[in-house]
Amino acid sequence: MAPSAQTAVKRVCLAYSGGLDTSVILRWLIETYACEVVAYCADVGQQEELDGLPEKARATGASACIIRDLREEFVRDFVFPAIRAGAHYEGGYLLGTSLARPLIAKHQVQVARETGCDAVAHGATGKGNDQVRFELAFRALAPELRVIAPWREWDMKSRSDCMAYAQKFGIPVSATPEKPYSMDRNLFHISYEGGLLEDPWRAPDPEMFLLTTDPAKAPAEAAEIVVGFERGTPVSLDAEKLSPARLLERLNQLAGAHGVGRVDLVENRFVGLKSRGVYETPGGSVLHAAHRAVESLTLDREVMHERDRLMPRFAELIYNGFWFAPEFDFLRAAIEQSQQNVTGEARLRLYRGSVQVTGRRSPVSRYSKAQSSFEDGGVADTYVQADASGFINLQGLRLPRADA
């Protein structure tokens, strides 16, 4: 398909990973639009996936390859707000991919402007959530840039077609017909979908997992760790202060070794389809459990319940790509306000796929052992048990009575 004069572009900034889809897209943009392509990669914790990326991008035809180290920003400004909110989508997905997309898009816009691009492009398919996440961010941050979504334009229908295209142009790719599922990795998680996983009855192949040990083969001896929080933000591990990215990285190693953080679910995509995804989020699973434990001591009951009522909508907005929407700002402000008193430590036990809270403490705890104890403890003046009779009677006034 050749672009018309009205759709011609001179330079495109492509969100580039070096994988099958974006490698093919890079070449396709050049062949289709006769334009320059600036390959942009956000380092959000892919690790070895970045090795040799600039050379590969240039060999495929890119005029430049720009890599930005966004690991600290990713954890500090995107993962930790989700932890403070207790955010999860449909009961199990901790939003690892969803949280990375607005950050990637934010810096893609910056790179596009810095390199004189008049368009941006992404490798999301026309069936998935990522196309929405990228393009809503582009619309909010840089509405003047043209958006090119090749999966909605070209004639290729599958990843098999992409592999054939890559062979035609001599593009080196790691995907093969025998292992066609796609993988997205960052410092918070790894997700797997497509290919063999599209059968929701088929169990994931054991060798697929990269961050977590098979729980059945995890160490027979449990590990105990202590995670510290200040105003809802994780700040320390076993009393050692660590940067956001380093803390999460350490937790991934510890929890992953004990098989913590595997999730296999069928979720509802924003576009209306159901999708089977398998996720590994070891450090994130620990942080969610630890955060809730500290909140149990420090949050006012009504504030906690209101935050919990806001959480599903907060998570849904992240999942659907509305990170830069005004309603998200509104919810985030309320959730951040709820965290001002969430300071303390949680002790957790990691054992063969499970995370168990074994203790929590806080210098600003609302918990009173004297008031809660079943022993008198000399606090009869602050809690008179007989007062509960009137409380119960008043609560029961609205209930129907059999003799009425």
Image (cartoon, rainbow, N blue to C red):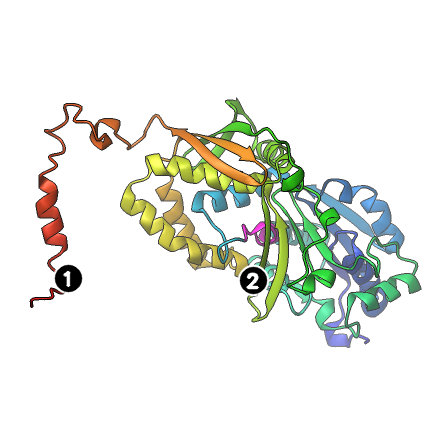
Identify the residue shown where x is 13% and y is 61%: 398
Residue 88 in view: yes
Residue 362, compared with residue 390, is above or below; it is above
In the displayed structure, does residue 168 sit left or right of residue 396? right
Q: In 3D space, how far apart are the residues under numbered discs 2 and 1 (Cα atoms)?
A: 39 Å
In the displayed structure, does residue 329 sit left or right of residue 14? left
Q: Helix or strand or loop: what does disc 2 sit on?
A: strand
Closer to us: 123 or 392: 392
Q: Residues within 10 Å of mark 1 (few under 14, many from 20)?
A: few
In the displayed structure, does residue 284 sit left or right of residue 154? left
Residue 121 in view: no
Q: Residues within 10 Å of mark 2 (few under 14, many from 20)?
A: some
Magenta stretch, residue numbers:
93-102
Would residue 100 be counted in the magenta stretch?
yes
Q: Which residue is mark 1?
A: 399
Q: Helix or strand or loop: what does disc 1 sit on?
A: loop
Would residue 176 be counted in the magenta stretch?
no
Residue 36 tag number: none
Please provide percent x and percent y for residue 306: 32, 51
Please provide percent x and percent y for residue 162: 82, 65
Residue 267 tag number: 2
The C terminus appears in which quarter of the rendering?
bottom left
